[in-house]
Amino acid sequence: MRIYETARALAERHNVHVVCQRYPKTDRESIIEGIHVHRVGFVQSQIHYLQRLVFSPFLLPSLLKIRFDIINTSWLLPPIISYASAKITKTPIVFTSDGILWGNVISNQIRGYGFIREAFGRMMEDIDLKPDYDGYIAVSQGTKSELTLMGIHPSKVFVVPNGVDLDLVDSVEAMRAKAPTICYVGHLEPRKNIMDLIEAFKIVLQEVPIARLLVVGSGNLMGEAMERAKALAIKENIEFKGALPHEEAIKTMKTSDCLVLPSLIEGFGIVLAEANACHRPAIAYDIPNVRDVIKDGFNGFLVKPRNIKMLTSRIIEILSDRKKGKKMGENGRRLVEEKFTWRKVAEQTLNVYRKVLELSI
């Protein structure tokens, strides 16, 4: 989403190319909203890192064929090939990080991914950050701190947050549900930690018996989450919606009183900003990378990680006082308008490019 939205905004005034892997029923070359898209390699129907690693050498011919002023690479595709092409063509290169995933999974002892996957992911993170890029974009202050801890000089790291498509958000029509309702939007995987929310919701129902929990997303913890809800005898109050189109996820946020994200690892927490854009407060665990989005008591609440009692209390506080929730939601909307629109993200990204280009002369 970030690549598309930023590229779309920059393409209004600049020549923007995106080089990516091929997917079924796509042309090798196309122009989408002014973005020149180059799809290379063999057709792939699935997305996982090993496939992207195998595919990455196909990037090199396209990157060498076109003369760029600057290259922006990221974790999404192994960036070593992008770095190699930048050195060959003497083109400045920027690396964008949306957070250190596998290093944090290991350091926080989050189980459920498997030793081989964790070890491979950590190894690739270390390899991807070995090159000396000309500049770095971090999506949050917390992400910048992660990069500096890995040896990157702070002066080379620029914080440019993620954004929200306010036009899309405002185009979705939905009424707040009559029953007190909270929602979760995200993958159902260990780091997202939905099990804490289910445990907390059991206690919430003791105070607010008619409360509802809407769960949007899919993942390998779906079955376990549903079984836990059944074991706690709260399944009737929880609706597992599965993966939904973006518009439907936004509609779910708008029908809810607040969004709850009990993640233990986030790069930014874009759903928190999206909830605020919907005029809804958000509750999240107090981890560094979400503090750029949620200001405790202003547009939501930050809760000590793993503190289910405190998480429960904050949910009940918002469900019991819709006036307070509305005030927080309005605060959040203003914050998004001021800091987290894709147009502002594109402008800040362009400023980073200009600084890197100036330093490379």
Image (cartoon, rainbow, N blue to C red):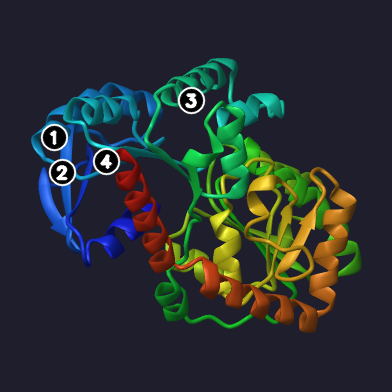
Question: Circles 2 and 3: CB distance less than 8 Å?
Answer: no
Q: Is 323 displayed left or right of 33 in the figure?
A: right
**Between 307 and 76, which is closer to the camera in this rendering?**
76
Name the amino acid, label 4. Ile
Q: Is 108 displayed left or right of 48 in the figure?
A: right
The mark that comes first in sequence, 3 or 4, is 3
Name the amino acid, label 2. His
- The residue that appears at 58% across and 33% down in the rendered structure is 148
Residue 125, numbered circle:
3
Measuring from the top left, give residue 292's x and y in whole percent: 63, 57
Residue 62, numbered circle:
1
In the structure shown, which secondary structural element does the residue marked by tag 1 occupy? Answer: helix
Cα distance in 3D space between marks 4 and 2: 28 Å
In the structure shown, which secondary structural element does the residue marked by tag 4 occupy? Answer: loop
Measuring from the top left, give residue 321's x and y in whole percent: 83, 79
The reply to whether residue 1 is visible in this rendering is: no
Question: In the rendered view of the protein, which quadrant contains the C terminus?
Answer: top left
The mark that comes first in sequence, 2 or 3, is 2
Q: Is 182 displayed left or right of 158 in the figure?
A: right
Cα distance in 3D space between marks 3 and 1: 24 Å
Q: Mark 4 sits on what residue?
A: 361
Measuring from the top left, give residue 179's x and y in whole percent: 73, 77
The mark that comes first in sequence, 2 or 1, is 2
The mark that comes first in sequence, 4 or 1, is 1
Residue 38, numbered circle:
2
Cα distance in 3D space between marks 4 and 1: 24 Å
Name the amino acid, label 3. Glu
